[in-house]
Amino acid sequence: MKKITIVLLALSLMSCASSPDKMQTAYVSPLAYKNHDCDQLAEEVSRVSRRENDLYKSLKSESDADNAQMAVGLVLFWPALFLLEGGDSPLAGEYSRLKGERVAIEEVAVKKKCSAEIILDAQAMQFSGSKATFSIKGWDDGVKTDSATDRNEALENAKLQALEKAGYNTSHITGVDDAETKQRLLEKKSSQILVSGYKINDKGYQKNGSYLVTFIGKVNKLR
């Protein structure tokens, strides 16, 4: 019985697909982008981001399925372990390479003094694999304009707090002067860090005249 247990544990450890949150970043030489101008680097960031997000979802699904199957196999039905994906697929290698491309693009963008938006878009998110639950009160700037504008300000404030909860340095966003660029950066980083399924509750204007929203959900924690 002891030998069987050892074999099953070894099989489960060998067969489970890795979570993309824990995958290493492959090295990609910045020389591959040395002749790109800032506009071309922005296009590369967009391409890498789209593919990286698609791969993340696929790899996370594989990893979660393997972990669930392993739990069933170890506790209830050990032959289920033989149905695991069998380690990391070739997509894992591509995902690590894309992370490396981000780092290379960022280095070139900094040297070419491209806009902060391009540089921040190129920064690869390094997730820890853990999540943090948040319940946040988001406020507007206290200057009453109209409900739509004030609500948006309150929601932006809540999202910034959520990013900080994940360990993200929000000064990269708040330090940007252009309002439209700042908004785009906030939405992009929020889409990467926030776990889907969060809830936004409008509390409306409070006695002090400020607009309030409550923001409840989870974030992927950064390393």
Image (cartoon, rainbow, N blue to C red):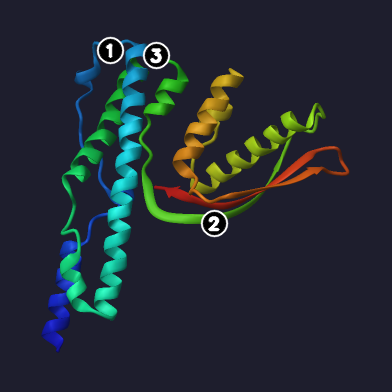
Residue indicated by mark 3: 113
Q: In this view, does 94 lie to the left or right of 125?
A: left
Mark pair 2, 3: CA separation: 37 Å
Name the quadrant containing residue 85. Answer: bottom left
Q: Which secondary structure, mark 2?
A: strand
| Residue lying farthest to the right in this orientation | 207
Q: Position of residue 24 (x, y in %)?
A: 25, 45
Residue indicated by mark 2: 133
Q: Which mark is residue 20?
A: none
Q: Is residue 140 above or below residue 13?
A: above
The quadrant of the rendering that contains the N terminus is bottom left
Identify the amino acid type marked 1: His
Q: Which secondary structure, mark 3?
A: loop
Identify the amino acid type marked 2: Thr
Q: Position of residue 7 (x, y in %)?
A: 12, 77
Label 2–label 1 contact, CB within 8 A: no
Q: How crowded is mark 1: few (under 14 residues within 10 Å), some or many (20 or more)?
A: some
Identify the amino acid type marked 3: Lys
Q: Where is residue 109 in the image (x, y as percent from the top left)?
A: 35, 18
In the image, 133 versus 128, the foreground residue is: 133
Q: Is residue 37 above or below residue 222?
A: above
Residue indicated by mark 1: 36
Mark pair 2, 1: CA separation: 40 Å
